[in-house]
């Protein structure tokens, strides 16, 4: 950058050659090309580490410059970061010649610098993985993939929504072509397999779609996970998805899309930028996953949840095929959500988290909900009576008076006496109903619909390690899952 006589700092011309396709999500007004120099002046704002820069939107492009797709950002060189590239957002309604205010802090500068260094480090690992793949390529061992997943941590095995949609499209293509069949480790109902709302389960999709496509010799580095196949340097995980492999792929797609965070933009709502850890797409299915799970602390599940930036987000995806907390790794993920205070969003019907007969579970959930929804006032009154025993007589007398008034002032003395008896009976009945509903609610959140102590795991060693890890927290996890079943969200027990 260079200074002029007025003390302003001139930005370089927008770096058209550095635009990436992801930036084409933004729009601009006609004439906002950004090809003329942008002029700004850094100004301290009370804190020497903060800088504010005014940027003039150029009115036209330099003659001969190509026309680009609509955008809402300029990419230019920062005047205070030794040529570092920054993006200046153009808000809706801005016009050529308007001035934008760009604020950057020293902390943001340091963070961006660390991110750039980390990306360079991961790019170097990609180059080394390619070299190893060329020198000692063995289809059975995948040396490049093994090296890359060892050097690029699980926190970068994220799947963007666009990548996930491409994955589902690949599944549909295989299904239509007849290359995805209803075969697998356990029998699977044809009506679920062929359903547009459920589809093949993840065991089938993994064996018949994910593994063949990630193993393909046409990939830059065969054997990597679907996530790194899409972007070899990886995407930072900002969302953690917990689910069960028994789910149907189309069922999972519906629930994931519904639960994925959204933001409002010029075109309406859109999916929040970011990437999700989804184990069947994030983990390398051709490598030794058992060794990756040998220690709970270093497992991909734990690493991602520990290193995920704040605010941590978990999407809990249910399936009609199985309560996901029958699987012990899902239980561990719920435990980590508790210990790390992770925000949980439910995708799918909460009743599918319950074990056993859904009809019975729905009745219990309905009772638990009715307790709060229809008896909130009565509960408050009952608690008052419990804490003030003397007031119970007044409550009965009041209720008796209400019932007596229904009989009418002209009623006989016997009728009014009967009304008092009825009032006492109603009070007792309401109390019994309230206590019963309270008992149902407490039983639900204490393992009445699913008890994580009964969860299973494919590997006996994993089972022992996980139960050791969550020891003493079983009731808290049951409470979390129970409240999710009843209310569809986290909340304190009733």
Image: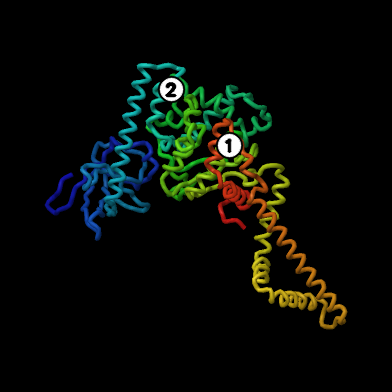
Residue 221, label in figure: none
Residue 244, label in figure: 1
| In the rendered image, the vertical position of residue 298 relative to residue 474, given as above or below | above
Instruction: Tell whether label 1 touches label 2 (CB within 8 Å).
Output: no
SS for callout 2: loop
Nearer the N terminus, badge 2 or badge 1? 2
Q: Quadrant of the C terminus?
A: bottom right
- Of residues 387 and 482, the one nearer the viewer is 387
Residue 418 percent coordinates (x, y): 85, 75
Residue 287 percent coordinates (x, y): 47, 25
Residue 166 percent coordinates (x, y): 49, 32
On the picture, is 462 further left or further right than 439? left
Residue at image x 38%, y 20%?
A: 133
Question: Which marked residue is nearer to the observer: mark 2 or mark 1?
Answer: 1
Q: CA distance from mark 2 to mark 1?
A: 26 Å
Residue at image x 42%, y 38%?
A: 155
**Which quarter of the figure has residue 34?**
top left
Residue 222, label in figure: 2
Residue at image x 56%, y 28%?
A: 205
**Which quarter of the figure has residue 378?**
bottom right
Q: Quadrant of the N terminus?
A: top left
Residue at image x 73%, y 47%?
A: 360
How many marks overall?
2
- Mark 2 crowdedness (10 Å alpha carbons): few <14, some 14-19, many ≥20: many
- Of residues 260 and 152, the one nearer the viewer is 152
- Of residues 311 and 69, the one nearer the viewer is 311
């Amino acid at each position: 950058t260079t200074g002029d006589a007025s003390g302003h700092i001139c930005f370089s011309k927008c770096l058209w050659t550095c635009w990436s396709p992801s930036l084409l999500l933004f729009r601009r007004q006609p004439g906002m090309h950004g090809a003329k120099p942008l002029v700004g002046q850094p100004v301290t704002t009370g804190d020497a580490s903060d800088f504010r820069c005014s940027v003039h939107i150029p009115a036209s492009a330099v003659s001969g410059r190509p026309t680009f797709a609509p955008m809402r950002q300029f990419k230019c060189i920062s005047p205070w970061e030794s040529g570092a590239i920054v993006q200046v957002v153009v808000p809706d309604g801005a016009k050529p010649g308007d001035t934008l205010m760009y604020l950057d802090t020293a902390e943001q500068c340091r963070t961006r610098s660390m991110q750039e260094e980390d990306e360079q480090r991961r790019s170097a690992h990609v180059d080394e993985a390619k070299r190893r793949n060329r020198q000692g390529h063995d289809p059975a061992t995948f040396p490049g993939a093994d090296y890359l997943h060892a050097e690029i941590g699980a926190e970068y095995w994220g799947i963007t929504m666009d990548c996930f949609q491409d994955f589902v499209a690949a599944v549909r293509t295989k299904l239509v072509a007849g290359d995805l069949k209803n075969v697998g480790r356990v029998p699977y109902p044809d009506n679920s397999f062929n359903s547009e709302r459920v589809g093949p389960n993840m065991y089938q999709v993994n064996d018949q779609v994910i593994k063949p496509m990630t193993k393909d010799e046409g990939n830059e580095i065969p054997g990597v996970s679907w996530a790194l196949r899409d972007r070899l340097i990886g995407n930072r995980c900002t969302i953690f998805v917990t689910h069960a492999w028994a789910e149907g792929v189309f069922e999972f797609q519906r629930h994931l899309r519904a639960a994925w965070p959204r933001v409002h933009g010029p075109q309406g709502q859109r999916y929040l930028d970011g990437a999700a850890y989804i184990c069947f797409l994030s983990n390398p299915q051709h490598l030794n996953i058992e060794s990756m799970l040998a220690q709970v602390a270093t497992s991909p599940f734990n690493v991602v949840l520990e290193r995920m930036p704040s605010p941590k987000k978990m999407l809990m995806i249910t399936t009609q095929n199985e309560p996901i907390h029958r699987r012990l790794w899902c239980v561990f993920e719920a435990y980590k959500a508790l210990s790390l205070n992770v925000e949980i969003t439910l995708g799918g019907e909460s009743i599918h988290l319950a074990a056993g007969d859904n009809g019975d579970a729905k009745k219990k959930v309905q009772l638990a909900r009715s307790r709060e929804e229809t008896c909130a006032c009565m509960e408050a009154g009952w608690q008052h009576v419990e804490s003030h025993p003397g007031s119970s007589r007044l409550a009965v007398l009041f209720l008796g008076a209400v019932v007596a008034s229904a009989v009418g002032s002209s009623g006989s003395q016997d009728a009014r006496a009967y009304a008092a008896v009825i009032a006492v009976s109603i009070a007792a009945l309401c109390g019994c109903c309230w206590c019963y509903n309270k008992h149902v609610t407490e039983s639900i959140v204490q393992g009445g619909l699913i008890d994580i102590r009964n969860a299973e795991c494919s590997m006996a060693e994993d089972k022992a390690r996980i139960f050791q890890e969550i020891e003493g927290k079983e009731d808290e996890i049951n409470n979390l899952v129970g409240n999710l079943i009843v209310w569809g969200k986290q909340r304190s027990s009733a």
